[in-house]
Image (spheres, grey):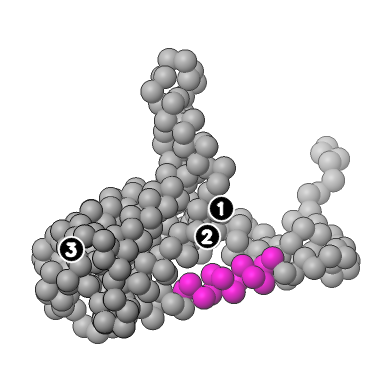
Amino acid sequence: MDTAPAARTRVAITERTLRTDRWWAAPLFTALGLAAFVVYATIRSFMREGYWAAEYHYLTPFYSPCLSESCVPGSSHFGTPIGELPEFIPLAFLSLPFLLGFRLTCYYYRKAYYRSVWFAPPACAVTEPHARYTGETRLPLIVQNAHRYFFYAALLITVINTYDAIAAFAGGFGLGNIILLVNVSLLWCYTLSCHSCRHVTGGRLKHFSKNPVRYWIWTQVSRLNVRHMQFAWITLGTLVVTDLYVWLVSTDTIPDLRFIN
């Protein structure tokens, strides 16, 4: 007869919290930061203006790739195989869902919004509102297991963003080129520092000594992985800065600082 005590589904904390510090500050600022980006990105994705600076060949990442006939001339680097789109569909509708899926299922972002939005739990030694815990075994959290597949899509989109940044040099060299290059470089750091990338490069290996190339790649990815959280937040900022700069330049609100015309 099994005499082992029954496992608890939740840690029994009778008090609301055992913390004496401002434990709520971190989840609050995290929620505000994520909400600010979501609001900005959503508005910009549906605006359909200020995304292509034709004179300098600047294309914002929020509209890349632009494959519809609704795209302004010159912004479709890969042609327009898709016809006109209704106003309620973003022009980058093929890439945005995958990028959203990649960010939502990212290991760091899970920690961020589990604590700040889902309150599971909001902080250590703080009571959470959920009576049961099913983990990532049921909808909607079971979708988190698709992270590795979103990684492959994000990798392809980062390649496209890299092409956009390089193609912009056809219009000369200005501050916008630097912003685009810095943004895509940091996007590479965020994408390659992903835990799934680390597993792809070094996972399932029993002997690193027999796979020196993969071991070297795994080592470099592991170095980036340590800073995955920082890259996750930095790239949210660089995406906004890049999009905002292209928006302001394309609408002639500010001039582009030119180095070579």
Say whether residue 37 is left or right of residue 20. Answer: left
Residue 43, picture quadrant:
bottom left
Q: Which amino acid type corresponds to the residue marked 1 in the rendered image?
A: Met
**Callout 1: SS:** helix
Question: Dot 3 surroundings within 10 Å: few (below 14), some, or many (20 or more)?
Answer: few
Residue 90 can be seen, yes or no: no
- Quarter of the image with the N terminus in it: top right
Residue 226 position by quadrant? top right
For the residue marked with disc 2, what is the amino acid? Trp
Magenta region includes residue 30: yes
Q: Is residue 33 visible?
A: yes
Q: Which residue is mark 2?
A: 233
Q: Position of residue 173 (x, y in %)?
A: 24, 59
Residue interval drawn in magenta: 26-38
Number of numbered markers = 3
Q: Is residue 143 magenta?
A: no
Disc 1 marks which residue? 229
Q: Residue at x 47, y 73 (%)?
A: 38
Marks 2 and 1, Cα distance to the nearest angstrom?
A: 7 Å
Extreme residue toward the top, this view:
210
Q: Please tell me which residue lies in front, 181 or 101.
A: 181
> Where is mark 3, residue-wise?
261
* Image: 226 above or below 244: above
Mark sitting earlier along the chain (3/1): 1
Q: Is residue 123 left or right of residue 170?
A: right
